Amino acid sequence: MIDQALSQLEVPQPSEAVAVGGSAASLRRLAGSRLDAEAFRRSLRLLAGEPARVIARRFELDIERVRLLPAGLLILQAAAERFAAPLRVGIGGIREGLLLEVAGG
């Protein structure tokens, strides 16, 4: 389903892409700041192998965020595959990126 939704998009092939937002920030705690194929595999294995409350406590995340994280991970993984580049988890969020874009920086 994710691949089907993204298949309609024409995307550039950058050497690096930046991920921001809640799922990216949470994944940073599980996998670090570089989200590549191995980081996605490790994180999904962890999320599937432990109860949400255990992961929430271990990584200091809200339990609801942990419950939603597998879906966010799969979307970010599909985006990385479309870009054909690993994702670097950025500081900030979509609002900050939009402000930088509008400001020309």
Image: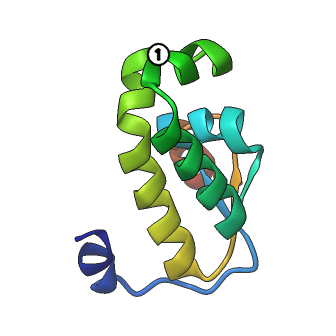
Query: How packed is label 1: few (under 14 Cα within 10 Å), some, or many (20 or more)?
Result: some
For the point 24% across and 74% down, the residue is 5
Instruction: Determine which quarter of the picture holds residue 99.
Output: top right
Q: Secondary structure at mark 1?
A: helix
- The residue nearer to you, when weighing 57 against 35, is 57
Residue receiving disc 1? 53
Q: How many marks?
A: 1
Image coordinates for residue 9, horizontal then vertical, percent: 34, 82
x and y percentages locating residue 33 in the rendered image = 77, 46
Which residue is depicted at the point 60% across and 58% down?
A: 40
In front: 63, or 76?
63
Q: Is 82 on the left-hand or right-hand side of 27?
A: left
- Horizontal side of residue 7 vs 89, given as left or right: left
Q: x, y percentage for residue 3?
A: 32, 77
Residue 66 versus residue 93 in the image, above or below: above
Q: Residue furthest front?
A: 49
Q: Residue at x 65, y 69 (%)?
A: 37
> Can the viewer see residue 21?
no
Say which residue appears at 56% left-offset and 85% top-offset.
12
Q: Amino acid at mark 1?
A: Arg
Residue 77 lies, with reference to residue 13, above or below; the image says above
**79 versus 21 height, above or below:** below
